Image (cartoon, rainbow, N blue to C red):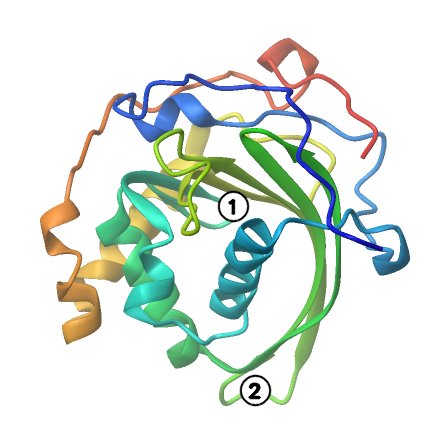
Amino acid sequence: MSAQSHSDTTHFPTDASVPGEQFEARQTAPSDDYTPDPSKSIKLSPARQALVDDILALYACEPTVERVKRYTPDCVYDDQFVYANDRYKMAGQWFALPKLFKAAKIERYQVVVNDRDLIQFKNEESWTFRGIPKTATINALVSLSLDPETIDSDFIRVKYHKDQANDKDYSHTGLGFNFKKWQADSVIKYMNSPETEAFVGDKGAGKEAVHQHGSGGKDGGAPVKEL
């Protein structure tokens, strides 16, 4: 099957100078079953597939400076354990993964949304911990909100990267969120490497206040979506 053109549907600002916090995709799901079916995956253009390939390589504990450049300086990374709100903190997270995990393997993935400014895919990944004979497999929905400035280029960048493993979205409030933010703020302090220092100039880039939603459900601006 040949690659499909993206839909014309847009979700986010078209001004690239707007901070990453304003590019958050929000949704709840009917269940937390994000098991991918690669046979139903939407085919992407070469530029979009190259972006997804680089993101998957980061997940697979294969970080490089060039792959981290897939994010804008003012990007946000948001998952169950981390809220990193600039590319410097983001770099700390990706370059820390190989220190925490012996191996990480993308088992399969399925692209489910290919809109003009949003790519979403279901991702199944196995993580093997260092020093612990245990492998955990996690299914999640990954949302990549695309940078308006590079959306039509050969090197597309990401404004907001969300990894959602539960049916509910993130509220960005409470002790759980405080831990996520503390983790991202702390890890980078111990990542003294040429790779992370390549992004020190991004510290605090374009930052604005965290968008708090009060809830991870429909009342928190996260409508139910079938993906």
* Tag in front: 1 or 2: 1
Horizontal relation, residue 226 to residue 136: left or right: right
Residue 177, horizontal then vertical, whole percent: 43, 36
Q: Is residue 193 visible?
A: no
Mark 1 or mark 2, which has the lower sequence index?
1
Q: Name the residue tied to disc 1.
A: 79
Q: CA distance from mark 1 to mark 2?
A: 23 Å
Q: What element does badge 2 sit on?
A: loop
Outermost residue toward the top in this view: 219
- Which kind of residue does numbered mark 2 sit on? Ile
Q: What mark, if any, has residue 125 been given in the picture?
A: none
Q: Residue at x 60, y 13 (%)?
A: 221
Residue 12, horizontal then vertical, whole percent: 48, 19
Q: Name the residue tied to disc 2.
A: 132
Disc 2 crowd, CA 10 A, few/some/many (<14, 14-19, 20+):
few
Q: What element does badge 1 sit on?
A: loop
Q: Are marks 1 and 2 in contact (CB under 8 Å)?
A: no
Q: Residue at x 67, y 20 (%)?
A: 217
- Judge whether 50 appears above or below 176 on screen: below
Residue 73, horizontal then vertical, whole percent: 24, 43
Q: Nearer the viewer, residue 111 or 212?
A: 111
- Judge whether 158 appears above or below 54 on screen: above
- Which kind of residue does numbered mark 1 sit on? Asp
Q: Residue at x 64, y 9 (%)?
A: 219
Q: Nearer the viewer, residue 203 or 134?
A: 203
Residue 81, horizontal then vertical, whole percent: 48, 50
